Image (cartoon, helix red, strand yellow):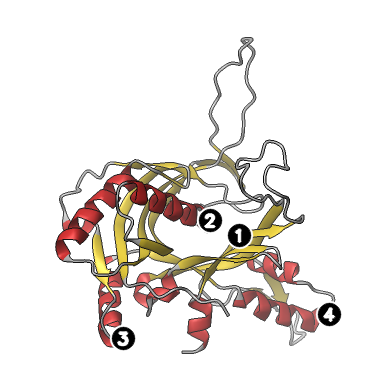
Amino acid sequence: MRQCPRPTHLLVLPRLRVQNANAISSPLTHGFPSMTAFLGLMWALERKAVKAGIDHVAFNAVGVVSHGWQEQTTQDGFIKSFRLTRNPVDKDGSTAAIVEEGRIHLDLSLVFALTVEDWNAAQQSTDVAMLVELVSGMRVAGGTVMPQERAWQPRYQAWVVDLTGDSEVQQKEFRKTCVRLLPGSALVARDDLIDQRWDAMRDDDPNATRLDAWLSLSRLEWHYDDSANTGKGAWQSLRRKGGGWIVPIPVGYGALSDLHPPGSVRHARDAETRFRFVESLYGVGEWVGTHRLRTPQQLLWYAHSDEAQGLYRCRNDYASSVSHD
């Protein structure tokens, strides 16, 4: 089974203020950008770093810690709508159509897993300053990174976590990092909950599918319990107390077609890379307080591609590590 690469260092960019990020993470979900956006940011940053002369640093994975958000919506009763903007007029002067674009303001920290050999203090300081400057000019999930008003304070300055020591030292350094990121919640994968809910649903309905289980976890469900036949039952939630902050999330893409040769599909973005039509894949995530994380692998997300199965996924090892505790 594929597991997260073990990094030698973690680069922490704390409490970035991102304005107008994309709140529509997939055709079926909204509320926080998809992890594919943050992995895309990591790869774009690595390419920029190489051009800037930082070719000795390899980026392996990324973790996201949310400290606050403000989705740009209006609410009328039980109905929420995105706050949309009126686009400029067309070339002929007619009114342009409104394109639905969900926006969200974010206060988040990014944790990049790095592999670096012989990273001395002087070189590390220079590289980190350059990487911070590069990120400040990039888009994060389509949003703009705003200047930090209190950038001079230590809590808003980037730092590096050295994971080259023994396991005890690594755990100690990571725990210090988790404490510094409080208050904050990390998004982790909990696809194991889909199988648990699916097994429970099949006890009542043998025809239940994994999609039914995913939908059940994605909504607030209540049922009337009068098992004693007293006529004085009560409505109970299927979400048990202490069950965690569970959310539906997109986790990558699944193939809809075979791989087409480079340049064979018109209007493709890259004419030198093989092309494939895909659709979104969905899973379940959980927002976990950083104080509950024990290892970097529980926090980090990494890419995993399986061309034979047509799967291009973002993976996180939180569920597997918890099941072995």
Q: Are marks 2 and 4 in contact (CB under 8 Å)?
A: no
Identify residue for label 4: 206
Q: Residue at x 53, y 47 (%)?
A: 23
Residue 116 drawn at (x, y percent) = 31, 67
| Neighbours of disc 1 within 10 Å: few (<14), some (14-19), many (20+) | many
Amino acid under disc 4: Pro
Amino acid under disc 1: Gly
Give the mark, 1 or 3, whose residue is nearer the N terminus.
Answer: 3
Identify residue for label 2: 36
Numbered mark located on residue 252 in the image:
1
Amino acid under disc 2: Thr
Give the mark, 1 or 2, whose residue is nearer the N terminus.
Answer: 2
Q: Are marks 1 and 3 in contact (CB under 8 Å)?
A: no
Identify residue for label 3: 167
Compared across the picture, whether 12 is left or right of 39 comes to left
Residue 281 drawn at (x, y percent) = 66, 61
Of tags 4 and 3, which is closer to the observer?
3
| Neighbours of disc 4 within 10 Å: few (<14), some (14-19), many (20+) | few
Amino acid under disc 3: Ser
Q: Are marks 4 and 3 in contact (CB under 8 Å)?
A: no
Quadrant of the rendered image containing residue 118: bottom left
